[in-house]
Image (cartoon, helix red, strand yellow):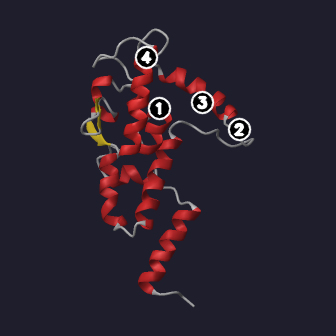
Amino acid sequence: LLIILLYTLGLRLGEALRLRIGDIDTARKTLFIRRSKFFKERIVPYGPRLAVHIQKYLALRKSFFVPITADAPLFFGRRGGVIPIGEIDKFLPHLLEEAGIETVSGKRRPRWHDLRHSFAVSRLLRWYEEKGDVQSKLTVLSTFMGHVDIYSTQIYLSITENLLNEANKRFYTEFGHPY
């Protein structure tokens, strides 16, 4: 569930780890993100597919662990408290190995925060594919990710081959092909 939240909602690792059971509104399908970067708070909506994963996780958590209270952390460590980020960071290399993802010598290994970058680029790509007004939606993306302006979001918008292809298609549809 942690990986799904990071990728599908673009949450920061610390935001996800600080989630409490009471921060989940299953009726409205929202998460309340508290104590975010620069002490901001926001409400993040989620879709029906994520709702299924959340319900399954909560049911599994309830059947295997202590009863669920509103103050209880969504993700908890061995002693029942919030999992420290350092503990999660130690887990990532094992997860990558199990998934068969090899790190390239001389290159930085994947980080949890890379899922936030993937979220932003994937969302942008979907807007292109849906023929949406990408420019006007950038402020929506910025707000959703908890940024105060688009400039903070720009660092997450790496160019990918798929994104470049979609942008090119849009350009050529609007202005014609150069040949």
Q: Nearer the viewer, residue 39 or 13?
A: 13
Q: Is residue 59 above or below residue 162?
A: above
N-term mark: 4 or 1: 1
Front: mark 1 or 3? 1
- The residue that disc 1 covers is 2
Residue 117 visible in the displayed image: yes
**Marks 4,1: beta carbons within 8 A:** no
The amino acid type found where label 3 is placed reads Leu
Q: In the visual, does 63 lie left or right of 40?
A: right
Q: Quadrant of the C terminus?
A: bottom right
Under circle 2, the secondary element is: loop
Front: mark 3 or 2? 2
**Marks 1,3: beta carbons within 8 A:** no
- The residue that disc 2 covers is 100
N-term mark: 4 or 3: 4
Q: Is residue 130 above or below residue 23?
A: below
Q: In the visual, does 106 lie left or right of 158?
A: right
- The residue that disc 4 covers is 63
Neighbor class of circle 2 (other Cα within 10 Å; few <14, some 14-19, many 20+) is: few
The amino acid type found where label 2 is placed reads Gly
The amino acid type found where label 1 is placed reads Leu
**Marks 3,2: beta carbons within 8 A:** no
Residue 75 visible in the displayed image: no
Q: Position of residue 4 (x, y in %)?
A: 47, 38
Q: Residue furthest bottom?
A: 179
The quarter of the picture where residue 99 lies is top right
- The residue that disc 3 covers is 92
**At 59% across and 25% down in the image, what residue appears?**
91
The amino acid type found where label 4 is placed reads Ser
N-term mark: 4 or 2: 4
Q: Position of residue 82 (x, y in %)?
A: 41, 18
Under circle 1, the secondary element is: helix
